[in-house]
Image (cartoon, rainbow, N blue to C red):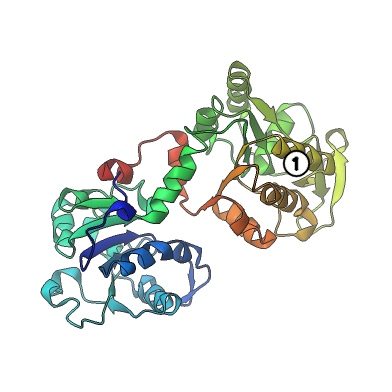
Amino acid sequence: MKKIEDEKNLDQKKILLRLDLNIPLLNGVITDSTRIDKILPTLSHLLKYNCKIIIISHIGRPKGKINLKLSMKPVCDYLTIKLNEKVKFVSKEIFEININALFSDLKEKILMLENIRFYEGEENNDQDFAKVLSKFGDIYVNDAFSCSHRAHASVTKITDYLPSFCGLQMNQEINALKKITSEIKQPITCIIGGSKISTKINIIKNLIPKFKNIIFVGGMANNIIEYKGFQIGKSVKEKNCDDIIDNIFSLAKKNDCNIIFPSDVSVGKHINDKAINKELSEIEEDDLILDIGKNSIKKIKLIIDNSKTIFWNGPAGYFENENFADGSLEIAKKIASQKKNIYSVAGGGDTIALLNKAQVINKLDFVSTAGGAFLEYLEGKEIPGIRSLN
């Protein structure tokens, strides 16, 4: 892919910039600005070259209908404050905008169009809609890796009409993912959680041949603990997973990959209970496994010490209750403390929330906000937005 930071002929060019600003709103107020903050370097880079920027983005799933609760206006206002630069909100429908009148005020540098998913042509990947969009700019930049697994008009078709580049954030995301999939510094360890093995089995199968260690935590670990013949009480588990787990262990053995799961756990009788550390043989019928145990934490920290690359997706327990946050927080702090020795990548909404809670989100090498695109890349799937930039 061509990178926008390598392009020098940008002065006064109109840049059609696709971003993912799909942030959570509560009564029109932004509750998490992580995705916005991450794309600020690309905006700053383009402003440095005196570009005129037209931002395309979306919030939610309006399914081609106007829904003012999903307007981009709050994001526009936030960006104005964050950049200390006026971002003009263009509420007119795209088909009604006089393109020649844009930036008629020479002081204007950034415009933001209304939610692109208000148009049916976007999610239908409509060629004619992409052509209309392309008239707004001289150059197209995709800095929305997290939308790039979607074959939508502003992600894929638009590259047919404009010189196209990836943005700084997208390039960082792909480089980070390469370091845990193809350009790996060994030994590499994956710490993976979540409630369902079935939703991540393709990722696990794709990573086993490349990874030295795969550590299961959270709800996934409960299935493995039960598979190994132990009682898990009332704990979260996924039904009918024995064949999947069998496949994981078989594939790991063929590829010399170590599968690690908790040897002890932290339990309660309900999610708001106090924590009791138990060996697997001590778990009772009315116990809930809500965190990994003390010995498991020590073992995982030792594995981290002996790794050169770490990929983390999914907390170790129910960290919302501080009594069951030890496993997740200890892992987070250990990875952060090894920044000089380990290349670390983390992803997933719960993992990001945990890293923020531990106040170490800026101490990992890369934290992905990409969600579906992040997971599909790890599965080895082709990403339409990357393909179109190529």
**Residue 292 position in % (x across, y down):** 77, 44
- Residue 254 sits above or below residue 147 on the image: above
Q: Quadrant of the N terminus?
A: top left
Determine the residue positioned at 39% across, 49% down.
171
- Residue 309 sits above or below residue 168 on the image: above
Towards the viewer: 160 or 194:
160
Quadrant housing residue 85: bottom left
Q: Determine if residue 366 is in view.
A: yes
- In screen coordinates, is 104 left or right of 342? left
- Residue 276 sits above or below residue 262 on the image: below
Circle 1: residue type: Lys
- Farthest front residue? 8
Q: Determine if residue 286 is in view.
A: no
**Residue 34 position in % (x across, y down):** 51, 63
Towards the viewer: 170 or 154:
170
- In screen coordinates, is 104 left or right of 273? left
Towards the viewer: 32 or 62:
32
The crowding category of the residue bearing disc 1, from other C-alpha atoms within 10 Å (few below 14, some 14 to 19, many at least 20), is: some
Quadrant housing residue 82: bottom left
Q: Which residue is mark 1?
A: 301
SS at mark 1? helix
Q: Quadrant of the C terminus?
A: top left
Determine the residue positioned at 43% across, 33% down.
380
**Residue 250 position in % (x across, y down):** 61, 19
Determine the residue positioned at 46% across, 51% down.
370
Determine the residue positioned at 25% across, 82% down.
107
**Residue 326 position in % (x across, y down):** 77, 52
Number of marks in picture: 1
- In screen coordinates, is 104 left or right of 56? left
